[in-house]
Image: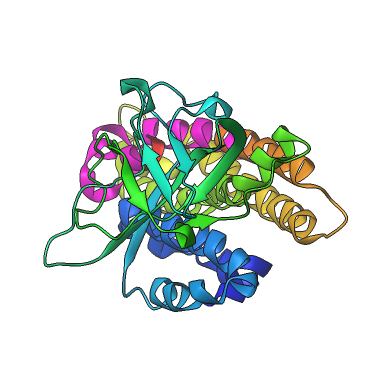
């Protein structure tokens, strides 16, 4: 993937989130999405105006560093992330002090524990910019690289961490509209909600295939004296499989339409975010119900970890 693939939402970027290989390791796919979309996409959007970010951008897209840490959610602020408490205080020499003022301001996710073997890890931290005592809204910053283990969720706090002026992504000006500033700062989350929802497509395909093959092999006796027949011959077994495949046929073009709207320059960030949430709700509602039905049609074997059905449903 290249920065243009991520920013332009190319077919290659879309396929990276709908390919069946996702089923092999869902946790790895989660790390992949945060690395390239949230952190990589944010840096890529700013790099044309910030030549100093180009070396870091190359490191991210070469996977020379691990950037699975997009620190927005706090222990006390999830759905109300506009009320973040972490602060970045501007200093007269142009630098910043990054601080966690209360326990509720500790960053909760994604994973940020140190990585082994000296693998660099970077984090994109969302904090409130304070300039001469004035709150100037949510901004993004880049603390120095750390070390940690993939998908280890920990609470992260900052104790008056001194950062250079280049760590701030964006300017110091007070925004005319705080809401628009917030939506701009979390722009990649809108894309993130969209691409994570796309996982429902390979989930449904994989689950339908697994349950279909199981239904062909699993046999029961038909009547008191009848021969053994595969359970796929029963309508109750056929319907959930057919329904899941029909959903894939409808959800995939719906996703294509939403992606097209995301790429449009005539639609504002608020509407794009709304479309991502609508798609996420539709995908999750349909996907979770179908996966539940498919799991039930697979009997006790549906709970076997090797089949992955329970993991996909969760």
Taking the image as shown, residue 266 lies to the left or right of residue 272, namely right
Whole-percent x, y for residue 122 in the image: 34, 59
Q: Nearer the viewer, residue 214 or 120?
A: 120
Taking the image as shown, residue 250 lies to the left or right of residue 294, namely right
Q: Is residue 42 above or below residue 135?
A: below
Q: Nearer the viewer, residue 221 or 245?
A: 245
Residue 100's quadrant in the figure? top left
Residue 278's quadrant in the figure? top right
Q: Is residue 161 visible?
A: yes
Q: Main secondary structure of the magenta part?
A: helix
Q: Is residue 25 magenta?
A: no
Task: State the residue at coordinates (84%, 50%).
Answer: 267
Residue 32's quadrant in the figure? bottom left
**How many marks do you count on the picture?**
0
Q: How is the image coloured?
A: rainbow
Q: Is residue 292 magenta?
A: yes
Taking the image as shown, residue 26 lies to the left or right of residue 255, namely left
Q: Is residue 110 above or below residue 155?
A: below
Whole-percent x, y for residue 74 in the image: 40, 30
Q: Is residue 86 above or below residue 228?
A: above
Whole-percent x, y for residue 156 in the image: 28, 38
Q: Nearer the viewer, residue 219 or 211?
A: 211
Q: Nearer the viewer, residue 138 or 253?
A: 138
Furthest-front residue in this view = 92
Q: Is residue 216 visible?
A: no
Task: State the residue at coordinates (61%, 48%).
Answer: 194
Task: State the residue at coordinates (58%, 71%).
Answer: 50
- Residue range in magenta is 285-311
Task: State the residue at coordinates (21%, 47%).
Answer: 113
Q: Which corner quadrant holds the C terminus?
A: top left
């Amino acid at each position: 993937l290249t920065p243009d693939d991520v920013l332009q939402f190319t077919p290659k970027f879309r396929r990276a989130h709908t390919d069946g290989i996702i089923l092999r390791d869902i946790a790895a796919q989660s790390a992949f999405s945060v690395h390239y979309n949230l952190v990589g996409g944010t840096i890529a959007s700013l790099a044309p105006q910030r030549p100093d970010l180009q070396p870091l951008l190359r490191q991210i897209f070469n996977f020379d560093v691990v950037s699975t840490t997009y620190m927005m959610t706090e222990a006390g602020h999830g759905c109300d992330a506009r009320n973040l408490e972490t602060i970045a205080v501007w200093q007269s020499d142009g630098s910043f002090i990054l601080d966690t003022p209360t326990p509720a301001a500790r960053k909760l996710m994604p994973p940020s524990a140190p990585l082994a073997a000296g693998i660099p890890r970077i984090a994109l931290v969302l904090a409130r910019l304070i300039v001469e005592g004035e709150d100037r809204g949510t901004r993004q910053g880049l603390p120095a690289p750390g070390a940690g283990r993939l998908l280890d969720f920990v609470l992260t706090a900052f104790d008056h961490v001194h950062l250079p002026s280049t760590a701030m992504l964006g300017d110091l000006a007070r925004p005319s509209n705080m809401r628009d500033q917030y939506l701009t700062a979390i722009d990649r989350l809108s894309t993130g909600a969209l691409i994570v929802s796309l996982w429902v497509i390979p989930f449904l395909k994989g689950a339908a295939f697994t349950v279909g093959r199981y239904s062909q092999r699993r046999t029961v006796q038909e009547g008191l004296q009848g021969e053994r027949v595969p359970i796929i011959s029963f309508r109750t077994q056929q319907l959930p499989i057919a329904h899941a495949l029909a959903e894939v046929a409808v959800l995939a073009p719906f996703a294509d339409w939403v992606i097209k709207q995301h790429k449009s320059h005539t639609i504002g960030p608020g509407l794009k975010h709304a479309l991502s949430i609508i798609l996420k709700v539709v995908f999750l509602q349909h996907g979770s119900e179908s996966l539940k039905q498919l799991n039930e049609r697979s009997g006790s074997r549906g709970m076997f970890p090797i089949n992955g059905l329970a993991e996909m449903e969760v």
